[in-house]
Each structure stands twice: as structure tokens, then as C-alpha cells.
Amino acid sequence: MITQKTIKQAVEIHGKGIHTGCITTMRFIPAPPDHGYAFCRVDLDGKPIVKALAGNVFDTSRGTSIRTGNAVVRTVEHVLAAVIGCDIDNILIEIDSEETPILDGSSSPFTTVLLQAGVQEQNVPRQVFQITEKVYLRDEVKDVEMWLIPDEEYRISTMIDYNSKVLTTQKALLNNVSEFNEQFSNSRTFVFLSEVEALLKLNLIQGGDIKNAIVFVDRILSPEELDHLATVFNQPKVSVLKEGVLNNIELHHANEPARHKTLDVLGDLTLVGMRFTGHIIANKPGHKTNVEFAQLIQTKIKATYGIEIA
């Protein structure tokens, strides 16, 4: 029997939200069996709880954001990937603003503090749903396809292709969630420079800098433009490697973007709300399709087992 798990003790982490720029403290708290994953907005009256479920998602434009009533928690995917990557079933995450901290743009800082907290087994069996039929999603507008193929294990294959000379086609395979901490957790978010410029015009990425995202430069920049970016990112200067990466950032993996997309898929699919088996194959995934796929899996679990997750 595989038992459910939580953390042994509470731990905290602090940082800035990438879009809002707000300074956030998050506190991970042990939770009882069958609690699942949930956030608590301790800065709001009544300290409302927001469960990490697909039905609570309200925005997937630049990350996955959830809410219950007026209580909002933005950009939850990196945190949730770390939680399941540490094999945790039950946790309460207290947060004192509306956005999780971006930190270095990966799950690694969250993974580190969760491992410091330690993992505590609980004397209640873990329920894992066996998906016995293929689940398929196609988004023709975004040219995204996602499959869940029946499998005794839980694994994720990811493929990305942005038709870009600076970021070529990549693949990544998470063969088992136990590989996540060492092989995927430190894979950082990435963005094209053209997207950065558009986001800045929308007054977003207020907490962003070149330390928490890999920026791929998809056009030639003048010296004046490089100076402007240095000012925006609060750096003495910025430059571009011949590989097209801004400011000489060293990649942790040759296929770090594909690994980060795998991280996002893992985090977003925790919003199913239950453990399940299957081989996820994701072709050019994004948060919108990840969440829609999580909802499809919930529908399959309800049809097969008669359990509605809410």
C-alpha cells in the first residue's frame, strides 16, 4: 500500500511576483489526509481557501491563475510542480499576496524548501486512478495536441516547435515523477524578446528580470536597444550570445525550454485533483490547453469511477 504524504514541518519562502511585482511570502503547512493542494490568502478577511483544481482556473494568459470568490492566486504552476515532484499529496500553502514568487523562474527554489521541511507519510492509502482509455485534445487555433495513453506509470513526453532560428525544435521525457527534482525542477521559464516588449507595453512582468527567465532574442538589436533593455532589467549592460540568448545566461540543459514546458504540464495537471496513471504526450503545450486537458481527465475519471472532483 502506498500511503499519502505531507510535509513534516512548516517552511517559508519569499520573493517577487513576475507580473505584479508584489513581494510575497509563502508558507507551506502540513495538511491532513485527503486534503489535497490548496492556497490560503492570509492577507484577506476570513483567510479564504482556494483549492488547486481545474474548475477554479480563471486565467491562463501568462501562467495559470486560480480563484474562489474574490480570492485570487496567480502563477501557481511552478509551485504545484514542486509539490508533486516531492511526492506530496496534502499541503496548505499560505500566501500573503495574489501572486506566487517567480524566484529564478523554475521550481527548484520551492523544491529545495519542501525537501528541507521533510516528507511525512500518513496512514491513509493514496488513491491512484488507472486511465484505461486514450484521452485526446486538439486546439487547432494554437496548433496544440495532447494525448493521455494508458500506462501503468505516470510519465510526460513534451515537444516544442516555435518555428524559430534561435529556439529550434526540442523534446523532453519525464519518465517518472521521481526524476523531476534532479532533472527538471531547475528548468527556467523562457520568453522571446518580442513577447517581453509586448508584455512591458501592457505593464506586465513588473517583477521580471533576466535572472528569472531565459530570453531568446528573435531579432537584431541596436546598441541603443540593448542599453534600453539594461535599464528595464536593472542591469549594467546586456548582450546577446550567438545562440540568441540574452545576457550570457548559461542553460542548465541543452533542452531546457522543453524541460520547462514539461514542468508546466506536470504542475498544471495537478489541477485534476487526484493522482492518475498514463503517458502524457504534449505537442507544443500551453497553460490553456494544459488546464483543458486536466478537465478532460476529470471527466474521464468521473465516467469510469463515478467520482466527481470538486
Image (cartoon, helix red, strand yellow):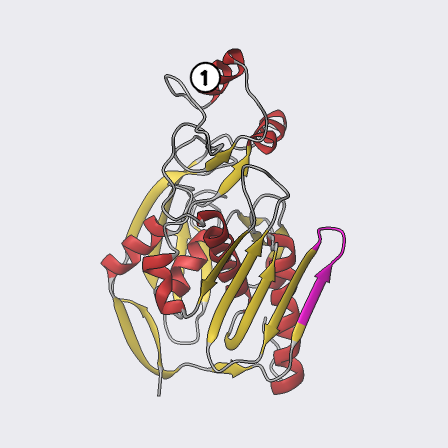
- Residue closest to the eye, 229 or 53: 229
- Residue on which the image places disc 1: 231
Q: Which residues are magenta?
A: 136-143
- Residue closest to the eye, 99 or 224: 224
Residue 144 in view (yes/no):
yes
Q: Residue at x 68, y 70 (%)?
A: 136
Q: Is residue 139 magenta?
A: yes
* Image spot of residue 5 (x, y percent): 34, 73
Q: Amino acid at mark 1?
A: Thr
* Image spot of residue 229 (x, y percent): 49, 20
Q: Residue at x 28, y 53 (%)?
A: 113
Q: Is residue 11 magenta?
A: no
* Image spot of residue 258 (x, y percent): 50, 52
Quadrant where the N terminus is found in the figure: bottom left
288 left or right, relative to 105: right
Residue 50 in view (yes/no):
no
* Number of other residues with Cα within 10 Å of mark 1, as a class: few under 14, some 14 to 19, many 20 or more: few
Disc 1 secondary structure class: helix
